[in-house]
Image (cartoon, grey):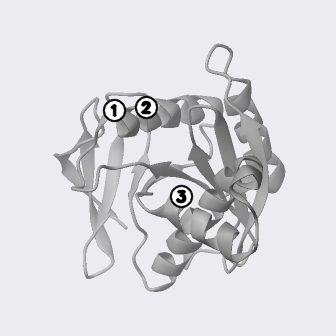
C-alpha cells in the first residue's frame, strides 16, 4: 500500500462530507462538512485547499452508481464534480470509487452511536466519506485499489484498471466516464 494521506469526498446536492486518513493509510476519520456552492464552487476551492494543506496523495470521490452498477444522473453529477476538483487541484489524483452503500453504512453507524435522525444531517456526509475512505484503504491493503483515477477534464478521463499481476491497462473514458480501451499499457 502506498503511504500518504488520502482525502475522501462524499458529495451531495446540499452538503459535501470530507474525511481523511493518517499518513500510513490505516484509519479514516471525519474532517468536516461543507455547504455546496454550485454557483461559485467555493466548496471545490475548500477541498483543494484541504488536500494541499494535508499533503494528500489522492482524493477519493464517491461515485453513486445505480444498484445495477450503471451510471445514472447522480453519477454523472459526481463525474462533473470530479472534473471541477481535477481543475482546482491538478497535482493530486482524483479516484472515483463506488459509493452505493456508503450513506446506508453511515446511517447505521450514526444510529448505533445513539444519534437521532435529526442529528444526522450535520454529520452524515462526513460519516459517509469515512465509510468510503475506510473501504478504499482496506481494499488497497489487499492489493486492489478500487475505482478509477480521473486524469483530466471531462471527455479526457483516464482510468486505471488493475490486473492480477499488479499491472494495469490505461483506458481512455468517454464524457460519461465509461472506460474505453486505450493503446498504451502502464503500471498499476
Whole-number angstrom distance, CA of label 3 to CA of label 1: 17 Å
Q: Quadrant of residue 5?
A: bottom right
Nearest to viewer (mark 3 / mark 1): 3
Q: Name the quadrant of the C terminus.
A: bottom left
Rendered view: 119 above or below 5: above
The residue that appears at 58% across and 49% down in the rendered structure is: 10
Q: Can the viewer see residue 28 in this picture?
A: yes
The secondary element bearing badge 2 is classed as helix
- Front in this rendered view, residue 171 or 79: 79
Q: Which image quarter holds the N terminus?
A: bottom right
The answer to whether one can see residue 152 in this image is: no
Q: Which residue is mark 2?
A: 77
**Residue 179: x %, y % from top left:** 22, 46
Total residue callouts: 3
Q: Which residue does the numbered mark 3 point to in the structure image? A: 103
Q: CA distance from mark 3 to mark 2?
A: 17 Å
Q: Are marks 3 and 2 in contact (CB under 8 Å)?
A: no
Q: Quadrant of residue 134?
A: bottom right
**Label 2 crowding class (10 Å Cα cut-off): few <14, some 14-19, many 20+?**
some
Callouts 2 and 1 close, C-beta under 8 Å: yes
Helix, strand or loop under label 3 = helix
Which label was assigned to residue 23? none
Residue at 55% of width from left, 63% of height from top?
A: 132
Q: In the rendering, at what x and y percent does residue 186 appear?
A: 31, 60
The circle drawn on residue 73 is: 1
Residue found at the very far bottom of the displayed protein: 142
Q: Is residue 93 left or right of residue 15?
A: left
**Crowding at mark 3 (Cα within 10 Å: few <14, some 14-19, many 20+):** many
Position in image of residue 95 (x %, y %): 48, 53
- Please report the residue visible at 42 percent of the width from the left and 49 percent of the height from the top: 63
Q: Tag 1, which secondary structure?
A: helix
Amino acid at each position: 500500500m502506498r503511504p500518504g494521506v488520502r482525502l475522501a469526498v462524499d458529495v451531495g446536492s446540499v452538503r459535501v462530507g470530507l474525511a481523511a486518513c493518517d499518513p500510513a493509510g490505516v484509519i479514516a476519520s471525519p474532517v468536516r462538512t461543507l455547504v455546496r456552492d454550485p454557483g461559485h464552487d467555493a466548496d471545490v476551492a475548500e477541498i483543494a485547499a484541504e488536500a494541499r494543506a494535508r499533503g494528500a496523495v489522492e482524493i477519493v470521490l464517491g461515485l453513486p452508481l445505480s444498484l445495477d452498477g450503471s451510471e445514472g444522473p447522480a453519477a454523472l453529477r459526481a463525474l462533473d464534480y470530479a472534473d471541477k476538483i481535477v481543475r482546482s487541484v491538478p497535482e493530486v489524483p482524483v479516484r472515483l470509487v463506488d459509493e452505493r452503500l456508503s450513506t446506508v453504512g453511515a446511517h447505521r453507524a450514526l444510529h448505533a452511536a445513539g444519534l437521532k435522525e435529526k442529528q444526522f444531517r450535520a454529520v452524515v456526509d462526513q460519516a459517509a466519506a469515512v465509510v468510503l475512505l475506510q473501504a478504499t484503504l482496506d481494499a488497497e491493503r489487499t492489493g486492489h485499489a478500487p475505482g478509477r483515477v480521473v486524469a483530466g477534464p471531462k471527455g479526457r478521463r483516464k482510468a486505471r484498471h488493475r490486473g492480477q499481476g499488479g499491472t494495469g491497462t490505461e483506458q481512455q473514458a468517454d464524457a460519461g466516464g465509461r472506460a474505453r480501451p486505450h493503446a498504451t499499457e502502464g503500471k498499476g
